[in-house]
Image (cartoon, helix red, strand yellow):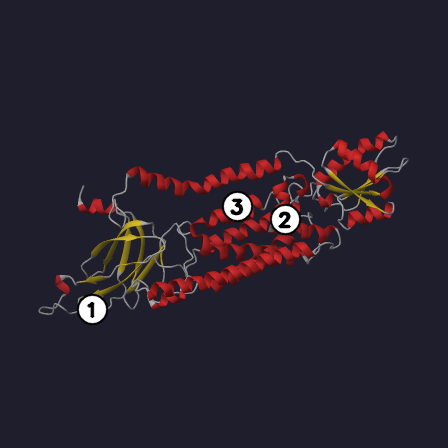
Amino acid sequence: MSETQQEAAAPADGEPRPRWTHTAKVLVSSLWFPALFFFGFLFCYLLAFHNPTPHDIRVAVPAPAAGQLRQTLDHAVPGGFEVHPVPGGDADLRKAVLERRVAGAYLPDPAHPALYTAKAAGFEIEAVLQQVFTPIAEHGGAPLKQVELAPTAPKDAMGTSLFYLCLGLTIPSYIMVMMMLRATVLSRWKKVVTFVVSGAVMATAAFYIALAMDCIVDRPICLLYMFMLSLGVSLTCYGLIPFVRQFFPGVAIVVFVLLSMPASGGAIPVEMVPAFFRWLHPYMPLGNLVDALRNEMYFDGVELSRPLLALSLWIVAGVVLICIGYFWERHRVRVARSGGDEELTPSDLEEAVQDPTFEMPHPMPVRAATHYIGASEPMLTGRIRDIGEQPLHGVLITVTTTDGRQLTRTRTDEHGGYSITGLPEGFVNVVAGGPRRIPSIKRVYVRDGSVAHQDFVLRPRAQDQPPGSAGASAPS
């Protein structure tokens, strides 16, 4: 093996790396994300939805009949219902359902038994109540009369439109953060403004499209709730990036998709999923938006304080994470500079590391002279000069893999500088050359989280160099 090949097969410390170790590392780094999806869907979705079972569904009944009915329900569905006695009759039962203190109410009138339900609170709950209370009423000798107190929108037959509406705001808000990481010329604060504006646009579009489909109720205040969800998800995702780095996609998927969706109570009512997801429900943003929209659209805005507080706290958490990440990155750069790290330039004090290689699969140049707060950290920088130490503007820089595959190209700025990010970890070839310059090639080892520096001194071609002036410079 040649010296160049040996160098390409070794990491920066020069120790040879076994081929099987390298292959295993590539496979793990490539497959952990689909593996997370695979097991996440099995343990979160299949576990949560394969056998919906009622747990502690609250049912209101007149106080005199509460004890007997509790025994009947415990025998029919052990642990499935909580009986809440109310002092009055028909009016109090209706009020308990409409104020969302209970999921349903039963009037055990021997002649006219009635079941009060709210389809808007969950189609499956309504079906379970009908299934359980129909034989109870018939056992008393009279058919059960069902009274629907909160029907869903005309074209929301299954009562799941709100769930898909909320889901349509959650996933794009997360994906938007991933895609904005590629906008390396935008500062941190410009990206935040983009999240705010995009959240408002998505909320408005989603609300009126769903309204045109006749699957929601026209309550414009819901636009604010939807905007709060989008903003909470996008800001929290963005704030997590400096802390979880290349694992950000996995963390975001676990929090906002794998855990949040089964705990939302949108597809399957939260009273019918396993205890873990019932416990998560009050804290996850998706479920809180579902609750806020249901309560606003179908129950005249009752019990909005908890879901709106939870959505607000997600927004606050995102802002706090972004601020902490900003100051932490600045501190880290200052510490590196104080330790004599010559690879850091003064402009690095205004730059934050926010571009894990997972989100930046394609190498691309960034501005070399001026870095923006929140922009991607360069992985490779350098300056090009002539033999007279004068900077060369417009020199073409080409970065290739060790086998010659081109990764990216850029040109030097007016100071002779260049800067590139998004490179794969390992050795790369850096080629510098101009139309009247002798090209130069260097092999450089780049690594995520650090900045490699490679300068070049380009000599003019023989025919372009004035006789007797070896140090003369010429424009590239």
Where is residue 36 drawn, in percent x and y?
48, 41
Q: Amino acid at mark 3?
A: Val
- Is 111 positioned to the left or the right of 11 in the image? right
Q: Are marks 3 and 2 in contact (CB under 8 Å)?
A: no
Instruction: Work out how far the residue at label 2 is from the one at label 1, CA to CA, in angstroms.
Output: 63 Å
Q: Residue at x 32, y 58 (%)?
A: 451
Where is residue 60 drawn, in percent x and y?
80, 43
First reached walking from the N terminus: tag 3 or tag 2: 3
**278 above or below 463?**
above
Total numbered labels placed on residues in the image: 3
Instruction: Work out how far the residue at label 3 is from the one at label 2, CA to CA, in angstroms.
Output: 15 Å
Q: Residue at x 76, y 37 (%)?
A: 129
Q: Which mark is residue 373?
A: none
Locate residue 148: give its quadrant: top right
Nearer the camera: disc 1 or disc 3: 3
| In front of the other: 61 or 386 | 61
Nearer the camera: disc 2 or disc 1: 2
The residue singled out by tag 1 in the image is 389
Q: How many other residues sit within 10 Å of disc 3, few (<14), some (14-19) or many (≥20)?
A: some
Q: Mark 1: which secondary structure? A: loop
Locate residue 327: give its quadrant: bottom left
Where is residue 428 drawn, in percent x and y?
28, 51
| In front of the other: 392 or 22 | 22
Q: Amino acid at mark 1?
A: Glu
Q: Mark 2: which secondary structure? A: helix
Residue 189 visible, this orientation: yes
The residue singled out by tag 2 in the image is 287
The residue singled out by tag 3 in the image is 254
Q: Residue furthest right?
A: 111
